[in-house]
Image (tube, rainbow, N blue to C red):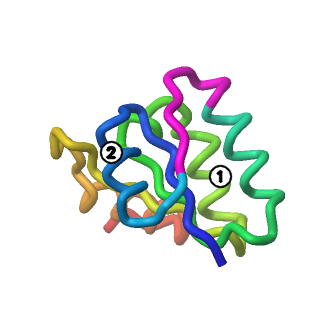
Amino acid sequence: MRVFCISDNVDTQMGLRLAGIEGVVVHKKEEVITTLDKLIKDPDIGIILMTTIIVDLAPEIISEYKLNLRSPLLVEIPDRHGSANIGETIDSYISEAIGIKI
């Protein structure tokens, strides 16, 4: 099983590359969707890390994948600016999945 990172900046991608995690830097919604579709079809990819800005480029598609795919695991990570509000994101996923606001 491999881990792959989709990032919006070179700093995050290079930092993870130093830890042995392959990745790509993209800036447009179409690039995010194309990259995700390619990675989802790869049976060797077990975890896909995505920066918050990447998730914000295609939230509806990524949310749909998170709710319906068994593999790979899609994980949102904060970027170097630390602008992520992961707690609210997790709450919204749970609320959407079970249909009750938490």
Residue placed at 52% from the left, 65% from the top?
99
Q: Label 1, on which residue? A: 64
User: In the current view of this chain or complex, which residue is farthest to the bottom?
Assistant: 1
Q: Which residues are magenta?
A: 23-31
Amino acid bearing label 2: Thr
The answer for how far apart the CA atoms under marks 2 and 1 are is: 25 Å
- Tell me what residue is drawn at x 80 percent, y 61 percent: 42
The amino acid type of the residue labelled 1 equals Glu
Label 1 residue SS: helix
Mark in front: 2 vs 1 = 2
Q: Position of residue 6 (x, y in %)?
A: 51, 45
Please determine whether, in this image, residue 53 is positioned above or below residue 15.
above
Q: Residue 44: which quarter of the image?
A: bottom right
Instruction: Name the residue tied to disc 2.
Output: 12
When the figure is inspected, residue 46 is found, relative to residue 9, above or below; the finding is below
Question: Is residue 9 located in the magenta-colored stretch of the structure?
Answer: no
Earlier in the chain: of badge 2 and badge 1, it is 2
Question: Which residue sits at x=73%, y=35%?
Answer: 34
Q: Residues within 10 Å of mark 1 (few under 14, many from 20)?
A: few
Name the one closer to the observer, 77 or 18: 18
- Mark 2 surroundings within 10 Å by alpha-carbon count, few (fewer than 14), some (14 through 19), many (20 or more): many
Q: Quadrant of the C terminus?
A: bottom left
Query: Seen in the image, is 41 located left or right of residue 82?
Result: right
Q: x%, y% of residue 96? A: 51, 59
Horizontal side, residue 64 vs residue 79: left or right: right
30 drawn magenta: yes
